[in-house]
Image (tube, helix red, strand yellow):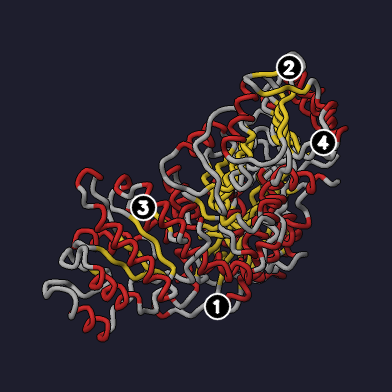
């Protein structure tokens, strides 16, 4: 069987084995208590039984190769056990032991041995807590857990076993189909698990708790698959890497750190990024039932003006529209609600009809007969001791029934997270209605899911999600810097428009200037001058030979003072460009092992001050480049700002595409690249300065 087939076996196991001591006997018992129906074996060479569970002496004595095995022995015995399991035809092994690659060079060698021993058998870990499979009641897990069997739900993949343990114990009623602690991801990691989990129709969403990704192309392929299927991926990513920052010479590097590039990866693939554990869980709950809203229009209901106000505020904050009630709805509502009810959306239906089933039904039928994409009800339960929960139960019942009658997607939230009790949450989830805890987190979660649904078709049409990102490997040394002339000629070959200049020497400058024509720009050319302005190595708008001669001598003196060891032996003469509509920066940032990124932003001398940029991972598409341009705050300068003419955006996209094409072609040894500024005019787009740094070739 292939590795992928064996991973599928591990995620839908017909039989289980546990290798280890008394804790494994307890783990086996928890599976039985949780409802697992298949054969289970406990393997221990030293005991005939443990805690009443009979033991098999060796995995070689098992009647067949189990589909899934939890191996809880030390690392040396784990190596031996994995090899034996692979020989028996087992589907997959979960390796609990630590002491592998996370410990250094010696552990890395042991992990490589472990991989060789596993062969085509699926391997989760090592150094991981294991796998909770609530679709099949298979808890390959070393300690207690708080989940229970479900018919469908979300899959959660985390790099933290403690996060998984705490999530299973949380009082949030998140229906979890699978929870995997991926550990070292020696073989089966986030990407591989996602790919297989997406073939399980009962998985309605995938949650990722990450520090980083080991297999970016594999992740991208799986995330694109999820986007095609309409399965939301919700990511809680921690940590910000600064890989390579100490080597950066370009302006581009100051605009896009690693965490920014993760944002770019997630945006490209429709992955929903959240900020913390609570928003992670609530957003997963909003997606867990699989009933996603078609858009962002919401009909909102509350029984108090205060709650209605919260609904209005948090809807606006999260991009949710509240369409007005029409005159027919208002007339119908006026017949059932008191005169002081404010007949708007959000609707405060007041407590006057509290406990009146017929009136509640009439109110719900009037409000839900709308073009809104979804409905929300705010409801806080009192304590059970009050005896007043039956009225809340009645409202939930009528609300659930009305959603079905009107074919509406809906959810319920509460002003205070703890005032939506588990009994209500479970009842709602059984009917496919998300029960979100806390109106602020609830509306934020729903807003993210609504945006995902609205944006999904656009992302697929843009074409980027189907392209596997380039992930260049690390290169040694600081590389070699091309001078401006070399950089421009390299990019010109890929279609970047550059000024029709001439490379010359100081002695031949006047003759070259006659051929270029006045007014012109004079620049010193040297790979030792990545930023010429600071060195006084640029002179603009020189209109006569006399002005050129003066500028040349002044430049010689400034450079001698700025960099005494640098020879002043090459200059570049270019026609003076007309004033542009805007200046852009177009650059390439390399994050070794993660991505090669195209950075587009407001350029010129204000690049770091404005910090107005967007990042696209390569390869990319023209549609994605255009969308990134249009998302810049400064894009108005290109669109006829204050009566000025508009730029030719097709020409701008074409120029940026040339930079992207160069980078893709040279991905193996390109370290960084800047075109700054890219001058955007009405009819012309020109790259007037460029910097390229390449790996030093042997």
- Looking at marks 4 and 2 on the same chain, the residue that comes earlier in the sequence is marked by 2
Q: Height in image: 5 above or below 308?
A: above
The answer, for residue 673, to whether it is visible in the render is: no
| Cα gap from disc 1 to disc 2, whole angstroms | 85 Å
Of discs 1 and 2, which sits in the foreground? 2
Query: Cβ–Cβ below 8 Å for labels 4 and 2?
Result: no
Label of residue 574 in the image: none
N-terminal-most mark, 4 or 1: 4
Vertical arrangement, residue 203 with respect to residue 353, above or below? above
Looking at the image, tell me whether mark 1 or mark 3 is earlier in sequence order: 3
The residue to which callout 2 is attached is 48
Q: Secondary structure at mark 2?
A: loop
The percent coordinates of residue 143 (x first, y second) are 56, 28
- Give the labeled residue for mark 4: 65
**Disc 2: CA contacts within 10 A as few (<14), some (14-19) or many (>=20):** some
Residue 364 placement, left or right of 133:
left
Q: Which residue is mark 1?
A: 682
Q: Quadrant of residue 227?
A: bottom right
**Quarter of the figure with residue 90:** top right
Looking at the image, do the residues carrying marks 2 and 3 touch, with CB atoms under 8 Å apart?
no
Q: Which residue is mark 3?
A: 424
Q: Nearer the viewer, residue 246 or 392?
A: 392
**Which residue does the image show at 86% across and 39% down from the upper left?**
698
Q: Secondary structure at mark 1?
A: loop
Q: CA distance from mark 1 to mark 3?
A: 61 Å
């Amino acid at each position: 069987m292939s590795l992928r087939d064996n991973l599928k076996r591990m995620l839908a196991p017909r039989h289980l084995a546990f290798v280890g001591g008394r804790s494994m006997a307890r783990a086996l018992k928890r599976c039985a208590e949780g409802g697992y129906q298949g054969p289970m074996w406990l393997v221990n060479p030293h005991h005939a039984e443990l805690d009443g569970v009979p033991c098999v002496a060796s995995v070689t004595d098992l009647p067949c190769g189990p589909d899934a095995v939890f191996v809880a022995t030390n690392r040396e015995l784990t190596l031996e056990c994995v090899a034996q399991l692979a020989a028996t035809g087992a589907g997959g092994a979960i390796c609990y032991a630590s002491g592998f690659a996370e410990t250094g060079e010696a552990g890395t060698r042991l992990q490589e041995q472990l991989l060789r021993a596993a062969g085509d058998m699926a391997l989760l870990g090592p150094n991981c807590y294991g796998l909770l499979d609530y679709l099949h009641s298979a808890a390959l897990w070393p300690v207690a857990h708080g989940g229970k069997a479900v018919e469908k739900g979300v899959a959660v993949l985390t790099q933290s076993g403690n996060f998984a343990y705490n999530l299973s114990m949380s009082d949030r009623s998140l229906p979890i189909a699978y929870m995997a602690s991926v550990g070292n991801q020696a073989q089966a990691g986030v990407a591989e698990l996602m790919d297989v989990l997406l073939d399980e129709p009962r998985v309605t969403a995938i949650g990722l708790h990450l520090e980083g990704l080991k297999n970016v192309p594999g992740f991208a392929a799986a995330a694109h698959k999820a986007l095609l299927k309409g399965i939301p991926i919700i990511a809680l990513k921690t940590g910000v890497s600064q890989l390579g920052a100490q080597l950066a010479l370009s302006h581009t590097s100051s605009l896009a750190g690693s965490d920014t590039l993760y944002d770019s990866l997630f945006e490209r693939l429709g992955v929903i990024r959240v900020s913390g554990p609570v928003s992670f869980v609530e957003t997963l709950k909003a997606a867990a039932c699989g009933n996603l809203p078609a858009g962002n229009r919401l009909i909102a209901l509350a029984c108090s003006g205060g709650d209605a106000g919260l609904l209005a505020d948090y809807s606006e904050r999260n991009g949710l529209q509240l369409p007005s009630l029409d005159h027919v709805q208002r007339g119908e509502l006026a017949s059932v609600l008191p005169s002081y009810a404010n007949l708007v959306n959000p609707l405060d239906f007041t407590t006057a009809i509290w406990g009146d089933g017929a009136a509640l039904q009439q109110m719900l039928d009037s409000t839900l007969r709308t073009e809104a994409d979804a409905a929300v009800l705010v409801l806080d339960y009192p304590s059970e001791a009050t005896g007043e929960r039956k009225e809340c139960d009645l409202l939930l019942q009528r609300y659930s029934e009305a959603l079905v009658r009107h074919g509406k997607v809906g959810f319920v939230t509460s002003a205070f997270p703890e005032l939506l009790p588990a009994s209500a949450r479970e009842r709602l989830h059984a009917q496919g209605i998300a029960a979100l805890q806390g109106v602020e987190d609830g509306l934020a979660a729903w807003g993210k899911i609504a945006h995902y649904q609205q944006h999904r078709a656009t992302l697929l049409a843009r074409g980027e999600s189907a392209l596997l990102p380039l992930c260049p490997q690390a290169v040694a040394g600081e590389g070699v810097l091309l001078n401006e002339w070399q950089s421009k000629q390299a990019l010109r070959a890929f279609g970047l428009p550059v000024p029709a200049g001439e490379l010359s020497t100081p002695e031949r400058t006047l003759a070259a200037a006659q051929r270029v024509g006045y007014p012109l720009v004079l620049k010193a050319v040297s790979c030792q001058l990545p930023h010429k302005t600071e060195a006084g190595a640029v002179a603009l708008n020189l209109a006569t030979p006399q002005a050129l001669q003066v500028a040349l001598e002044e430049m010689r003196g400034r450079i001698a003072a700025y960099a005494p060891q640098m020879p002043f032996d090459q200059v570049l003469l270019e026609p003076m460009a007309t004033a542009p509509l805007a200046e852009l920066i177009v650059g390439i940032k390399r994050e070794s092992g993660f991505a090669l990124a195209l950075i587009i932003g407001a350029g010129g001398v204000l690049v770091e001050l404005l910090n107005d940029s967007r990042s696209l991972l390569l390869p990319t598409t023209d549609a994605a480049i255009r969308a990134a341009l249009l998302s810049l705050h400064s894009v108005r300068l290109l669109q006829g700002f204050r009566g000025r003419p508009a730029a030719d955006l097709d020409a701008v996209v074409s120029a940026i595409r040339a930079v992207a094409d160069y980078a893709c072609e040279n991905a193996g040894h390109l370290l960084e690249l800047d075109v700054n500024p890219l001058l955007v005019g009405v009819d012309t787009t020109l790259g007037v300065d460029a910097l390229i740094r390449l790996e030093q070739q042997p």
